[in-house]
Amino acid sequence: MRKISANYIFPISQKPLKNGILILDDNGYIIDIIDTKGNLIESENLEFYNGILVPGFINTHCHLELSHLKNVMPKHTGLPGFLLQLSKLRVSEKDEIISNIINADKEMQRNGIVAVGDVSNNELTFETKSKSKIKYHTFIEIFDINNNTEEVLNYAYKLRETATECNLSSSIVPHAPYTVSSTLFNKIFEISRESNSIISIHNQENQDENKLYINKSGKFFESGIVPINFEATGFNSLPSIVKYLMTENNKILVHNTFTTEQDIKYANKYLTKLYWVICPNANLYIENKLPDIEMFIKNNQNITIGTDSLASNNKLSILNELITISNKFPSIPLELLLSWATINGAVSLNLNKFLGSFEKNKKPGVNLLQNINFSDMRLTDNTMVKALI
């Protein structure tokens, strides 16, 4: 049994506790949370830390298989340029790719990440994920810009079988609105409805995605990164694909850099169980632009946090993502930021039974955040995370 305390505990399920105490069994399950009312009394075997205690972080969007591309991809190319470079540079020796995958998984563990929604276009990450302490949900991502719908579906089914053999939960999901035909969208809709699996899709990461759907213009259309026989709708991309997402499953929209308030309201009119993933450092790496996060808050949306891949980020650290948001949007309270990085991510991945908050009988992991600005209760550029459990 361990008894752990700090200047503050952020249980997420309740208000922060000053000098509170976490009591955990030897397997990391929470036995009790004690509110000392700020008056900590000496106790045998009590561990006290300067900082705040928070549940383990949830990384709702990652591409572990691209870990070998760290410091390879140029910055600020815009998404169409990034994708064209990615298709040329992602090929490498299998042993090198797997070695970097293993290192990236360990990096996330060190950074206090306990669960990940990970995108896979192949099976190279499966063995590492099956052995990891991190709980992974694998999004088997497909697209059919070459009009090869049946081929990519058959491949996705095989990947799903392999994931199951590796004891990995998985979903077959669309890559993005601009790379998936209406035929494939309908097939994925049927699959997700039948299996009640989580849906994840890259959404409005670049303005040209909206231009494509409005009038078949922009860099995606010009470069041919679109399905054959693509038809414009006259609307932004998200309203144009909502009909393919109208299931009872959790729906995770990733990036949302160019999502408008009108898009949000339209999506909420037709969709439930909707989660918006913000990957700020990747957004800055590729587009040098962030989503209007305050607009999402104003509209009471469920926000979660992702790192994207090392092809578009320098670190796989949820804390670093939170620091970036805090610096760019200083009015956002720390308690709200931490809820995005913990319970919201856990709920979106259907992992909230054990993860995401400090509650009795949960096993969420325990992170210590040090170098906090306690006077303003804010993260600083020097804030660090240490995984205690």
Image: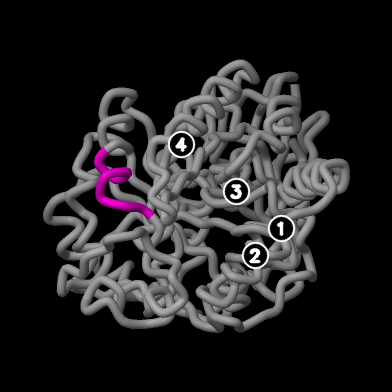
Measuring 82% from the left and 30% from the top, which residue is drawn there? 45
Upstream in sequence: badge 4 or badge 2: 2
Residue 181 is covered by the magenta coloring: yes
Which is more foreground, mark 1 or mark 3? 1
The stretch of residues the image draws in magenta is 180-186
The residue tagged 2 is 86
Q: Is residue 267 left or right of residue 57?
A: left
Which is more foreground, mark 4 or mark 1? 4
Alpha carbons under labels 4 and 3: distance apart: 51 Å
The residue tagged 1 is 90
Alpha carbons under labels 1 and 2: distance apart: 6 Å
Q: Regarding mark 1 in the picture, which secondary structure is present there? A: loop
Percent coordinates x, y for residue 375 in the rendering: 61, 75
Quarter of the rendering occupied by the N terminus = top right
What's the residue type where badge 1 is placed? Arg
Q: Nearer the viewer, residue 354 or 277?
A: 277
Q: Taking 319 as reference, is 207 above or below it?
A: below
Measuring 37% from the left and 75% from the top, which residue is drawn there? 221
User: Which numbered dot is residue 9?
Assistant: 3
Q: Taking 135 as reference, is 274 above or below it?
A: below
Upstream in sequence: badge 4 or badge 1: 1
Proximity of marks 4 and 3: CB atoms separated by less than 8 Å:
no
Which is more foreground, mark 4 or mark 3? 4
Percent coordinates x, y for residue 145 in the rendering: 42, 56
Residue 3 is covered by the magenta coloring: no
